[in-house]
DNA sequence: GCGACAG
DNA sequence: ATCTTGTCGC
């Protein structure tokens, strides 16, 4: 698939902030997804002391969650890890991998935040705006926001709030395990995002999509 | 100025 | 993310 090149990736943090502030206006928070037959998971791994980025994309059928196609892309790492700027470090290699797949996904679940971000433009939003494919942010830990205590049962969730705003949901994808931080990426509402994440976690805490992409990205 | 801080 | 073995618990 082809992905539009909206900007350079060789940036200072000040320039990155300007891009986030500009592109967040293109993020769609409502549902505009069609029939979902394929869901992709994307994840990153690093080699050579972090100098090489390894992106993995796994396209699974939905709702049966069977691996249909996968791709891996290696690329020199050019941006450091700075909380709030994850997309500038990971998306270049992810795009390389996405460009080689033939099964265009109807939905992408990202390993990181969507609008649950200081400027409401986490990696899931960024990838969504660039590809114009519906995306969901499903992170393993918190970036920003506060929430009430969460019940232990799978399926229970609490709104994640930041400055009077609901920016996502803290979701128990598996009973008695640490929750997932789910937020809107692009073209998917929060209730729909929660629903897809639950339907992609029939057995483990992490979505099957990211679990498979994770294995591909880590060489083992 | 002091902490918090996706992967 | 990555460095790393065994071990506790359902």
Image: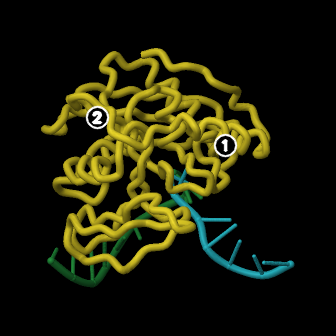
Chain colours: A yellow, B cyan, C green
- Tag 1 residue: A21
- Using the rendered image of the protein, determine whether residue A143 is visible from the camera's viewpoint: yes
Where is residue A117 drawn, in percent x and y?
56, 55
On whether disc 2 and disc 1 are found on a single subunit, the reply is yes
Where is residue A42 drawn, in percent x and y? Answer: 41, 38
Q: Is residue A137 left or right of residue A69?
A: right
Q: Is residue A216 visible?
A: no
Relative to A94, is A103 on the left or the right? left
Residue beneath the point at 38% across and 34% down: A134
Q: Is residue A63 left or right of residue A147?
A: left
Task: Indicate the quadrant containing the C terminus of chain A: top left, top right, bottom left or bottom right.
Answer: top left
Q: Read off the chain for label 2.
A: A
Q: Is residue B6 above or below residue A35?
A: below
Q: How many marks?
A: 2
State the separation of the CA atoms marked 2 and 1: 28 Å
**Residue A151 percent location from the top left of the image:** 26, 77
Near mark 1 (Cα within 10 A), the count class, few <14, some 14-19 or many ≥20, is few
Picture layout, residue A172 above or below residue A190 = below
Circle 2 sits on which residue? A39
| Disc 2 to disc 1: CB gap under 8 Å | no
**Dot 1: element:** helix
- Report the front residue among A25 and A36: A25
Residue at 24 percent of width and 51 percent of height: A195
* Residue at position x 55%, y 43% in the image: A46
Above or below — where is A125 with respect to C1? above
Compared to A17, does A157 lie above or below? Answer: below
Question: Front-most of A196 and A75?
Answer: A196
Side of A114 where B3 appears, left or right: right
Q: Residues within 10 Å of mark 2 (few under 14, many from 20)?
A: many
Depth check: give the residue in front, A25 or A217.
Answer: A25
Query: Helix or strand or loop: what does disc 2 sit on?
Result: strand
- Earlier along the polypeptide chain: callout 2 or callout 1? 1
């Amino acid at each position: 698939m082809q992905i539009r090149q909206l900007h350079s990736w060789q940036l200072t943090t000040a320039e990155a902030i300007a891009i986030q502030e500009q592109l967040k206006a293109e993020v769609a928070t409502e549902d505009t997804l069609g029939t979902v037959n394929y869901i992709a998971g994307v994840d990153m791994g690093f080699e050579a002391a972090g100098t090489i980025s390894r992106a993995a994309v796994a396209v699974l059928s939905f709702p049966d969650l069977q691996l249909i196609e996968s791709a891996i892309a290696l690329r020199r790492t050019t941006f450091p890890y700075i909380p709030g700027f994850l997309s500038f470090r990971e998306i270049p290699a992810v795009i390389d991998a996405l460009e080689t797949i033939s099964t265009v996904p109807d939905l992408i679940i990202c390993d990181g935040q969507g609008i649950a971000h200081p400027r409401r433009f986490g990696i899931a939003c960024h990838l969504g705006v660039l590809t114009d494919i519906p995306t969901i942010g499903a992170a393993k830990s918190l970036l920003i926001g506060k929430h009430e205590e969460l019940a232990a049962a799978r399926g229970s969730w609490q709104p994640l709030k930041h400055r009077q705003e609901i920016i996502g949901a803290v979701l128990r994808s598996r009973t008695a395990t640490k929750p997932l931080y789910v937020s809107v990426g692009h073209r998917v509402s929060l209730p729909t995002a929660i629903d897809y994440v639950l339907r992609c976690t029939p057995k483990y805490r992490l979505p099957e999509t990211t679990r498979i992409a994770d294995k591909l990205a880590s060489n083992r």
